[in-house]
């Protein structure tokens, strides 16, 4: 029996580390290119993502982040191109 191929197969079948299911405020802001000040302003205005409190931590689920992005896209206006063809 080839132990090298057996070891390689076992490594391929091993479960991978779970991806995070939530963002911290810091990670959410970094992932979305906004500052914490902007996030808290959006939350105050009622247009931020849904948040959850776990102990003293404020977390944002991946689903809430995706929902928020969809809402932001729906509310965005399409900007005309910088160059327009006059032909």
Image (spheres, rainbow, N blue to C red):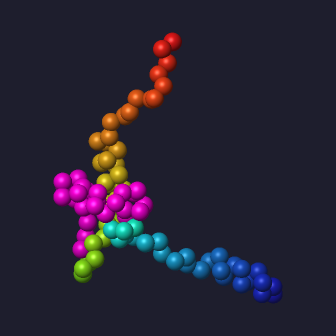
Q: Residue furthest right?
A: 1
Depth order, front residue of 13/59: 59
Residue at screen point 28% across, 77% down:
57
Q: Residue at x 37, y 34 (%)?
A: 78
Q: Which residues are magenta?
A: 28-53
Q: Is residue 19 magenta?
A: no
Is any part of residue 28 visible from this angle?
Answer: yes
Q: Nearer the viewer, residue 4 or 57?
A: 57
Q: Position of residue 77 (x, y in %)?
A: 33, 36
At horizontal 34% and vertical 49% (from top left) the residue drawn is 70
Q: Position of residue 84 (x, y in %)?
A: 47, 22
71 to the left or right of 86 = left
Relative side of 13 to 30, left or right: right
Measured from the top left, where is residue 75 in percent x and y? 29, 42
Q: Nearer the viewer, residue 42 or 19?
A: 42
Q: Is residue 50 visible?
A: no
Decide: is 35 above or below 19.
above
Residue 73 in percent (x, y) is at: 35, 44
Residue furthest top as drawn: 87
Q: Relative to residue 2, is residue 52 drawn left or right?
A: left
Position of the N terminus, as image quadrant, is bottom right
Q: Nearer the viewer, residue 24 or 62?
A: 24
Q: Quadrant of residue 13?
A: bottom right
Question: How many discs appear?
Answer: 0
Q: Is 52 a magenta residue?
A: yes
């Amino acid at each position: 029996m080839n132990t090298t191929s057996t070891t390689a197969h076992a490594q391929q079948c091993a479960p991978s580390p779970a991806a995070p299911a939530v963002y911290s405020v810091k990670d959410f802001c970094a992932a979305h290119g906004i500052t914490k000040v902007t996030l808290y302003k959006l939350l105050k205005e009622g247009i931020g993502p849904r948040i959850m409190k776990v102990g003293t931590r404020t977390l944002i689920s991946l689903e809430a982040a995706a929902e928020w992005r969809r809402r932001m896209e729906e509310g965005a206006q399409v900007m005309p191109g910088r160059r327009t063809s006059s032909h």
